[in-house]
Image (tube, rainbow, N blue to C red):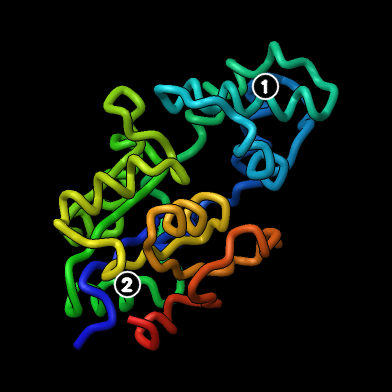
Amino acid sequence: MAAYDEICFDLDSTLCEPTQDPAAVLERAFEGVDRDPFCTPADLRAAVPALPTVQTAEEFYAELFAEVADRAGADAALAPSLAERYLEVQDPTAVRFRPGAEAALEYARDRGRVGLITNGGRKTQIQKLRALGIEDAFDVRVYTDPNAGVYPKPDAAPFERALGALEASPERAIHVGDSLRADVAGANAMGLDSAWIDVGRDEAGGEHDPTYELDTLERLEAIV
């Protein structure tokens, strides 16, 4: 008997990773507005929890660059232009599977129903799924959609949407993701077990403890 009836996955940094160099993408964005960089990719990641909920990718990156500009003492008025340029440079189709991810997804599909719960919007994330050839690999896909009341993880809405579509009970489901703040905290609050993939970002533990800690998805078979 499988350990879980339903296995849900995050997408970015869990199943896939970009093939573009994040630092190079950021540098080109700053070149596009003729300014010296005032942040790094790590600074962008660190600022995400402070952002308000927005409707579009353009708004998200405008808020993100405004936040990091404030933190760096730079001109936040550049944020909309930086966001526009960043999205022009960034290619959603330039992705590859993370180590062990393709096999882990196939294994999960053989064991039970499979869901995708991602903090990305439908338009961008579908491009990634198609590039990886896994658009139809999930029994349900849940994207961030504030207009429909589906706010980003750790909000309960995306987990509720996925469990409802899968007709799943939380105690028989697990969520796999790379973020303690979004994936683990959200799953824990809903009563799901959680598997955290440590991708080396030095996230602080303790506040959100995963059920399992994995250094690679190649170890997923041991828990599901």
Residue visible at 22% across and 64% down?
114
Left or right placement of residue 74 versus residue 196 in this view: right
| Residue hosting label 2 | 102
Residue 113 placed where, x, y %? 17, 67
Q: In the rendered image of this protein, does residue 163 appear above or below residue 113?
A: above
Left or right: 70 as drawn, with respect to 58: right
Quarter of the image for residue 155 reads top left
Q: Nearer the viewer, residue 42 or 140?
A: 140
The answer for how far apart the CA atoms under marks 1 and 2 are is 36 Å
Earlier along the polypeptide chain: callout 1 or callout 2? 1
Q: Position of residue 127 (x, y in %)?
A: 30, 44
Q: Nearer the viewer, mark 1 or mark 2?
A: 1
Q: Amino acid at mark 2?
A: Glu
In the picture, the quarter occupied by the C terminus is bottom left
- Residue 184 at x, y percent in the picture: 50, 59
Q: Amino acid at mark 1?
A: Ala
Compared to 16, does 155 lie above or below?
above
Q: Is residue 84 left or right of residue 219?
A: right
Q: From the image, which quarter does the N terminus lie in?
A: bottom left
For disc 1, the marked residue is: 66
Viewer-side residue, 71 vs 154: 154
Q: From the viewer's side, name the closer residue of 36 and 40.
A: 40
How far across and down, in percent of the image, does residue 124 sit?
35, 38
